[in-house]
């Protein structure tokens, strides 16, 4: 009876941990909004620095989503120079894919010019 409170706490902790991954996986499945990949950085983009992600046995889709999340955490809205490679075995993983990129912040496009009707007057 002396250890009963600890058993109850341990059971609650395990139950809470068992229920958490489904919720976080569902939320993390979507890429960050308004974040994009650029083959070449636009000329007006501001470079924020390198971002890197390494996952144990992660797939390409998860890696690219996580690299975008890292760029958003740095204040960016995109990445450029994305490279992914397999680092091989480690003590805990069969393979360790790593993706690296440069986080950038691309300013929004300016508004379009006002339309001009046939008589030369602006609307």
Image: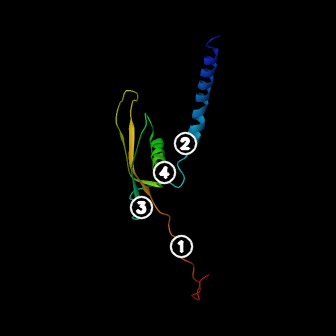
Task: Quote the CA–CA distance across marks 4 and 1.
Answer: 27 Å
Determine which residue is flagged by label 2: 28
Disc 2 from disc 4: Cα separation: 14 Å
Question: Is 30 situated left or right of 78 in this image?
Answer: right
Q: Which residue is mark 4?
A: 72
Query: Which one is earlier in the sequence, the residue at label 1 or at label 3?
Result: 3
What is the distance, in whole Å, between disc 4 and disc 3 at their CAs? Answer: 14 Å
- Density class for disc 2 (Cα within 10 Å; few <14, some 14-19, many ≥20) is some
Taking the view exactly as shown, the residue that stands out farthest to the bottom is 119
Task: Please state, as top left, top right, bottom left or bottom right, where the C terminus lies in the image.
Answer: bottom right
Label pair 4/1, CB-CB below 8 angstroms: no
Label of residue 112 in the image: 1
Nearer to us of marks 1 and 3 is 3
Mark identifier at residue 9:
none
Q: Position of residue 109 (x, y in %)?
A: 50, 67
In the displayed structure, would residue 109 be above or below residue 102?
below
Q: Quadrant of the N terminus?
A: top right
Residue position marked by numbered label 3 in the rendering: 45
Label 4: which secondary element: helix
């Amino acid at each position: 009876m002396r250890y009963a409170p600890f058993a109850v706490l341990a059971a609650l902790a395990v139950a809470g941990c068992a229920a958490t991954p489904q919720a976080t996986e569902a939320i993390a499945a979507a890429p960050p909004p308004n974040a994009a990949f650029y083959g070449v950085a636009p000329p007006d983009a501001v470079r924020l620095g390198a971002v890197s992600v390494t996952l144990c046995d992660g797939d390409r889709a998860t890696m690219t989503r996580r690299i975008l999340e890292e760029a958003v955490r740095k204040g960016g809205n995109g990445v450029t120079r994305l490279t992914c490679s397999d680092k091989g075995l480690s003590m805990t993983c069969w393979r360790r894919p790593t993706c690296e990129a440069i986080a950038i912040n691309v300013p929004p496009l300016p508004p379009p010019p006002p339309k001009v009707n046939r008589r030369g007057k602006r609307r």
